[in-house]
Image (cartoon, rainbow, N blue to C red):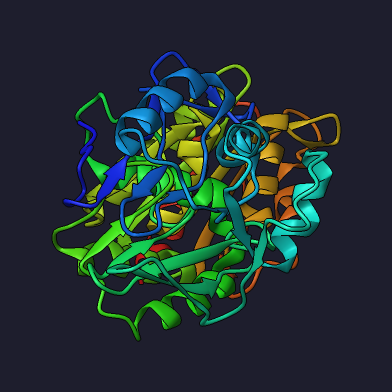
Amino acid sequence: MKEVNISKDIINIGASDNNLKIFENQYVLKNGMSYNSYVIKDEKNVIMDTIDEAVTDEWLKNLDKALDGDKPDYLVVSHMEPDHAYNIGLIAEKYPEMKIVGNQFTFNILSNFFDLDISNRKVLVKEGDVLDLGKHKLQFFMAPMVHWPEAMVSYEQTEKMLFAADAFGKFGSLDVEEDWLDEARRYYIGIVGKYGMQVQALLNKAATLDIKTICPLHGPVLKENLRYYIDKYKTWSSYEPEEDGVLIACSSIYGNTLNAAEKMADILKEQGEKTVVIRNLTKDDWAECVADAFKYSKLVLASSSYNAGVFPPMEHFLGRLKERNYQKRKIGIIENGSWAPSAGNCMKNLLQGCKELEIIEPVITIKSRMKEENIKQMESLAEELLK
């Protein structure tokens, strides 16, 4: 559940859209989506980001309750993406004396979305600058390309809170109890996964701070065992496998390739692999499939040939992997084709440019239906994968 009072002076005024089924028109949601926004009460009152259009009414009620008759002195804009910045125009009009805090990129992008004259209301901050609120002091750190160029985080020095923008977020409403890890991984790989180097740079900055609480723009406020969350981000952003195991990603038209994938799973288990996961790319959520590819240390691609290429679900999957800088994995390939198998070469070509991939040769070729010789080839492939 959403923790409203983070501390005596810091309040989460965000809201969840429990009915949202698709985020960014591409990510399937199981339990809606949360949008966080915060108020810091002090000699100077601050709103930390606004909120998505869909939950504006609830946000305004929460804001009024938190301010309790006071007015905000500042709006800090951590990230200009519309799910956090939609209400900047509304709140700027409601409180004409409120100043808007951002970096140079913030204001460049803000002018794309809003026709606002904020020339006498703009507070331009750069790396390391501090905004003195009274008891609380906000220090700003730039986080470019995590995951937009204007992104920045704010460290509240007194209560040692990191307002982390889109970092450390997850899919899911805060009205639903669920484990953090799976939806945080899917969120990270989908939204931020391309920008590992930039995330590493932000983690290096965070390592210099004494952080007791992390306040993201999506998902729960994190207070306990922060090392666990930070270590997950270190692993994900370095593209190292999170766990030892094999993902078998299968793209099958009539089921024969899927049969081979299932047989491959059995062989791997017989040879001692404890963790083997099969994902059916024609039915499973693509974002979960991509997240699993980053989770495990080894990958087997099994696909039907199609139009002298590869079956489109596999093409889509590999394109998403490459876009997110997939690397440092061991890969086996199984292709199927009735008269001119083409999927194997196509899959290898789609992975060209990915770093530190070890593709095991030869590619296993099935012609329509798995035969005994293919089973022997899969046994050899399993041995090579598990070396």
Of residue 20 and residue 313, the one placed in the foreground of this image is 20
Q: Looking at the image, which residue sits at the far top?
A: 19
Q: Could you tell whether 67 is left or right of 131 in the image? A: left
Of residue 58 and residue 371, the one placed in the foreground of this image is 58
Q: Looking at the image, which residue sits at the far bottom?
A: 208
Q: Residue at x 81, y 48 (%)?
A: 111
Screen quadrant of the C terminus: bottom left
Q: Residue at x 69, y 63 (%)?
A: 149
Q: Is 174 drawn above or below residue 167 in the view shown? A: above
Q: Is 244 drawn above or below residue 139 in the view shown? A: above
Screen quadrant of the N terminus: top left
* Corner quadrant of residue 286: top right
Q: Is 39 drawn above or below residue 83 in the view shown? A: below
Q: Position of residue 314 (x, y in %)?
A: 65, 37
Q: Position of residue 217 (x, y in %)?
A: 43, 46
Q: Could you tell whether 157 is left or right of 332 in the image? A: left
Q: Could you tell whether 82 is left or right of 275 in the image? A: right
Q: Residue at x 27, y 69 (%)?
A: 135
* Corner quadrant of residue 14: top left
Of residue 321 and residue 120, the one placed in the foreground of this image is 120
Q: In this orientation, does residue 361 appear?
A: no
Q: Position of residue 338 (x, y in %)?
A: 73, 28
Q: In this orientation, does residue 206 appear?
A: yes
Q: Position of residue 209 (x, y in %)?
A: 32, 81
Q: Residue at x 43, y 27 (%)?
A: 59
